[in-house]
Amino acid sequence: MERDREMSMNKGMLGALALVLVPVGCATDGTPGEYGAILGEVFGSQTATAGTLSQAEIDAGLREALTVGTNLVAARLGQPNGYFSDPRVHIPLPNTYRDIQKNLSLIGASGPLDDLELRMNRAAEASVPEAKALVLGAIRSITIEDALQILNGGDTAATDFLRNKTQAQLRQAFTPYVSTALAQSGAFTSLEQAASQYNLGGVTTKLQGDLTTHAVDLGLDGLFLYVADEEKKIRENPVARTTDILRRVFGNRT
């Protein structure tokens, strides 16, 4: 408090000195513009210093934005129809099956493939809690390089940075959970039935692996797509800054 009083006294003395130095002509025209300009010069450097964010604060703010975004997106996607009914993140069948599905849908005979597609999306929805845990772990563990540049970067700079740094490891770690979810959802059984019915050959371990990779890739794509949207909201909309650190960091960007 003693330091605050000293700073206040110093500001008052500087302000008084500034007013004394204002030309007499400025004092008689009744406009505050000249006073504001001079006082701005006097206090400008002090204000800038007080508003400067530390590297630690910026780092914490970026992590908080990614954490908040991930939690919101996981709550949205990790429920029935989170993927399946959302055209932005809906996971279609792999191309080989998609072409057959499209042709069969014209005659109302695409039921088995439609079922496979539904089960694949259900598996993605069931895997969201594990994806969330992996992404939050990545947010905590990565070193955020050039944090100020990311803060003042594009609308999705933090999400892009996170994805570039972690997507390979996330895909590898996420794959076993999606594979289990596909099996439990009945997707592998539907895959076997579809392959047999449409003469696509017997279901092999490789074919199941391909379906798993497809679901993992598009599942994470959808997750990061919406995390980027949440980051953009935090940057643009003060209402979306739901914590003190978000308000401080994203409310003080230059």
Image (spheres, helix red, strand yellow):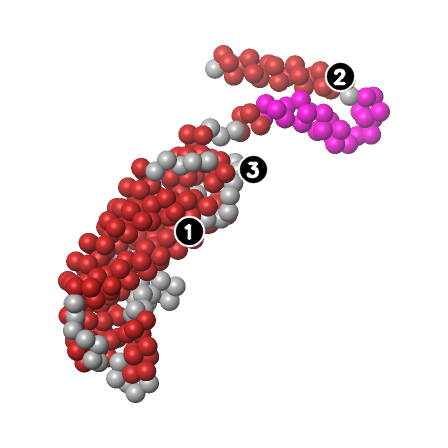
Task: Give the residue number, with chain letter if any, for mark 3.
Answer: 254
Q: Secondary structure at mark 2?
A: helix
Dot placed on the residue nearer the N-terminal end, 1 or 2: 2
Q: Secondary structure at mark 3?
A: loop
Residue at x 30%, y 87% (from the top left corner): 107
Frontmost residue, 161 versus 28: 161
Name the spot of residue 27 as percent of width and height, x first: 80, 24
Task: Give the residue number, with chain letter if any, for mark 2.
Answer: 20
Frontmost residue, 237 versus 121: 121
Q: Is residue 240 something that shows in the picture?
A: no
Name the spot of residue 148 as percent of width and height, x first: 49, 35
- The residue range painted magenta reads 23-47
- With respect to residue 132, does 49 lie above or below? above
CA gap, disc 1 and disc 2:
53 Å
Taking 33 as reference, is 137 left or right?
left
Q: Secondary structure at mark 1?
A: helix
Frontmost residue, 199 versus 73: 199
- With respect to residue 17, does 114 lie above or below? below
- With respect to residue 174, does 45 lie above or below? above
Q: Quadrant of residue 18?
A: top right
Residue at x 38%, y 51% (from the top left corner): 227
Residue at x 23%, y 54% (from the top left corner): 175
Q: Amino acid at mark 2?
A: Val
Q: Which mark is residue 228?
A: 1
Q: Is residue 135 something that shows in the picture?
A: yes
Dot placed on the residue nearer the N-terminal end, 2 or 3: 2
Query: Within 10 angstroms of label 2, few (less than 14), some, or many (20 or more) residues?
Result: few
Q: Amino acid at mark 3?
A: Thr
Dot placed on the residue nearer the N-terminal end, 3 or 1: 1
Q: Are marks 3 and 1 in contact (CB under 8 Å)?
A: no
